[in-house]
Amino acid sequence: MEVHSTHDFDRDFKKLFPNQLTPLADAIEAVKVNPLAGVTKKGTLKEIRIYKYRSLDQVWLLAYSFDGERVITLHAVGPHENFYKQLKRRSQ
């Protein structure tokens, strides 16, 4: 499975602390193993899937898309607060 990331994801990734990287790596691996693990969103975000995971006793969200073949594109990562609002703004 091939994994790509967007510029927005890379920017979010750079802001993470070292102790937040291991749970994110585990979440990405879970998505690689089962690309349909995330929940498909509706409306303007219908192309995006959201995978929820825990990091430091907080729920974090990983936004990604899957082309149905072999490519997973990571779009964003962050805590639930204002996540969808920022994701909608980025996708416009």
Image (cartoon, rainbow, N blue to C red):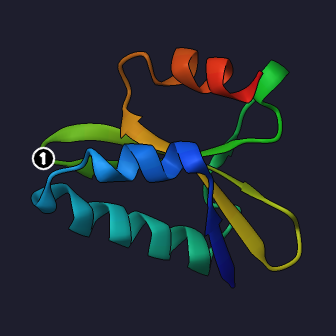
| Residue 70 vertical position relative to residue 4 in the rendered view, above or below | below
The x, y position of residue 50, in whole percent, is 58, 43
The residue wearing badge 1 is 56
Vertically, is 30 above or below 79?
below
Q: Quadrant of the N terminus?
A: bottom right
Measuring from the top left, give residue 18's x and y in whole percent: 13, 61
Residue at (83% x, 19% y) in the render: 43
Image position of 30 (left or right of 6): left
Residue 34, picture quadrant: bottom right
Q: Residue at x 13, y 42 (%)?
A: 57
User: Residue at the bottom extreme?
Assistant: 1
Q: Is residue 42 visible?
A: no
Left or right of residue 47, residue 79 in this image:
left
* Residue 75 locus on image (x, y percent): 60, 47
Asked if 41 appears above or below 48 in the picture, the reply is above
Count up the numbered dots: 1
